[in-house]
Amino acid sequence: MFNPVGMAMPIPGLLDKLPGIRTKPLARFNTGGPDVEMIRVDTGATLSGGRAEVHRMWVVFSGSGECGGRGIAEGTFIYSPPGSDIPPLRADQQVIIYSSRFETRRVTRS
């Protein structure tokens, strides 16, 4: 299955094409991010995993389920650095997630 979560920059509404997944873009500050959105995973739906191409942080605002063999609930923080595996997230109860993605910044010193 195509995995839009691992994309460098999301395409608005792309996750909405997956069954049981809805997104609400909140802000995009520049081409490298941060890109902020809310994700809703309906009861019984699974957000597919993949490989992170950018930094990705999720905070579970409500609901419960499982991600990478661990239980998730309100307050769960999930961080995936670039190059890491992103485990699938399954919702046992509808899950609402705050999502932020951004590229690594290179700092040059003179």
Image (cartoon, grey):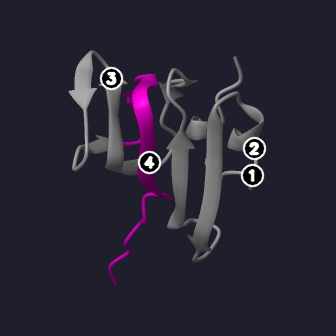
Helix, strand or loop under label 4 = strand
> Is residue 106 part of the magenta span, yes or no?
yes
Q: Residues within 10 Å of mark 3 (few under 14, many from 20)?
A: some
Residue placed at 54% from the left, 66% from the top?
A: 33
The residue type indicated by label 2 comes to Leu
The residue indicated by pointer 1 is: 11
The residue indicated by pointer 2 is: 14
On screen, residue 48 above or below 6: above
Of pointers 4 and 2, the one earlier in the residue sequence: 2
- The answer to whether mark 2 and mark 1 are in CB contact below 8 A is yes
Q: Magenta part of the protein: which range?
A: 81-110
Residue 102 percent location from the top left of the image: 48, 59
The residue type indicated by label 3 comes to Glu
The residue indicated by pointer 4 is: 96
Q: Which is in the foreground here, disc 3 or disc 2?
A: 3
Of pointers 4 and 1, the one earlier in the residue sequence: 1
Q: Which is in the foreground here, disc 4 or disc 2?
A: 4
The residue indicated by pointer 3 is: 66
